[in-house]
Structure formats: structure tokens, C-alpha cells
Amino acid sequence: MLGDVTLTLGEAFGVALTGLSVVFLALISLLIAIMIISKVVGGIQGKADANKSNQKAAAPVKAAPKKAVADNSMDPALLAAIVGAISMQERSRVESFRIVSINEKK
């Protein structure tokens, strides 16, 4: 395809540098686009969460049910992994939800 074209060492480095710079500029632009989109979606989701919390606050308050005795026999590392996985899946902070019980299926 190139035929009789020969490149000097300096031209070859120039072509390689141009190719690398194009790739990294594309990766940087993708990073910036992902950050902007995540901020926009996070803002929209935050507004939706605020509306839900306002609707819940307006609802009549019911008496709190009795708390069950917690079974602390689960490995703390496993419990932390489960809480972290739920937090990542829900894309919310750990303080924004409460785990009532964890049942192991056999």
C-alpha cells in the first residue's frame, strides 16, 4: 500500500507520536464526556430522590414496629461486602438505606 515510500527515523517517530497523541486525546475526551454525563444523570436522580423524600415526609407517620434482635453471627467482612455491593448497585450512599435481614440460601 505504501509502495516506494520510505520514512526516516525522525519521520517514523513523528508518525508514532501523532498516533499516540490521537489515541490519548480520544481517551481524555471520553473521560470528560463520561464525567459530564454522570453529573447530569446524578443531578436528575438527586432531584427525583428529593421529590420522593418530600412525598414520604408528607405521608402520615405510623408507629415504628418493634426491632428484632440482630443476629451478629455473620462474618463482618462478608457483611461489609454485601453492604458495599448493594450500595454500588443502588448507586446510593450506605446511610440512605437500611438492611433489615440477610438470609443465606442453601
Image (cartoon, rainbow, N blue to C red):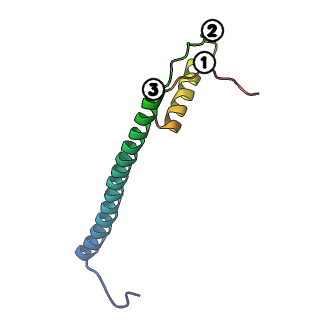
x and y percentages locating residue 28 in the rendered image: 31, 56
The residue sitting at the left extreme is 10
The residue that mark 2 highlights is 69
Q: Secondary structure at mark 1?
A: loop
The residue sitting at the right extreme is 106
x and y percentages locating residue 50 in the rendered image: 40, 34
The one of 25 and 55 positioned closer to us in this rendering = 55
The residue that mark 1 highlights is 75
Q: Secondary structure at mark 3?
A: helix
Disc 2 or 3, which lies upstream in sequence? 3
> Which residue: 56% across, 13% down?
64
Q: Amino acid at mark 3?
A: Ala
x and y percentages locating residue 82 in the rendered image: 57, 28
Q: Residues within 10 Å of mark 3 (few under 14, many from 20)?
A: few
For this view, does 48 lie left or right of residue 16? right
Residue 5 versus residue 65 in the image, above or below = below
> Which residue: 25% across, 72% down?
14
The residue that mark 3 highlights is 58
Q: How many marks?
A: 3
